[in-house]
Image (cartoon, rainbow, N blue to C red):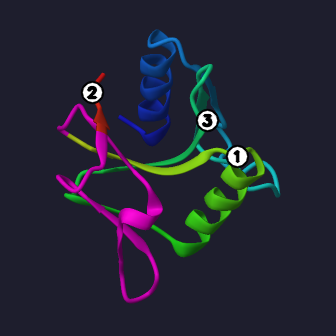
Amino acid sequence: MSGSRYERELVNYLDAKAYHVVRAPSSGGGTTRELPDVFWSKADERSVAAELKTTSKTKAYYTEQEVTALKEFAAAFNAHARLVARFKGDTSYYVCAPRDLYRTNNGSYRVEKGDEIFTIDP
């Protein structure tokens, strides 16, 4: 399954849980603006701007530039910035705050399978 299919699966799951969800299919590719992959909200809860990575490995990496852009977008909407990892063969989405993740020597952020803050199980 492609990354966009995993994004749509996450959107459908959140929609079924009564969240208001928007997926930005271009994720910045069709515009000069930096956009999250998925943005969701529910009344009386703080919104979430998320960047989703899908991998067949046990670690997902996000560049410092991706995370900085995500944080800036989230701050503009007073939302949480979250990094979401989907490991192929695992049905969970691992949702993490950037501040809780390991930073590599080159400044990238790393999510490891099992390091999750919380998971979403569709």
Contact between labelled residues 3 and 1, with CB atoms less than 8 Å apart: yes
Which mark sits nearer the N-terminus, 1 or 2? 1
Q: Is residue 15 above or below residue 110?
A: above
The range drawn in magenta is: 89-118
Identify the residue shown where x is 48% and y is 33%.
7
User: What's the residue type where badge 1 is placed?
Assistant: Asn
Q: Is residue 100 magenta?
A: yes
Identify the residue shown where x is 19% and y is 37%.
90
- The answer to whether residue 10 is seen in the rendering is yes
Q: Which residue is mark 1?
A: 78
Nearer the observer: mark 1 or 2; the answer is 1
Image location of residue 73, percent across then percent down: 71, 53
> Between 51 and 75, which is closer to the camera in this rendering?
75
Image location of residue 34, percent across then percent down: 73, 56
Q: CA distance from mark 1 to mark 2?
A: 26 Å
Contact between labelled residues 2 and 3, with CB atoms less than 8 Å apart: no
Give SS at disc 2.
loop
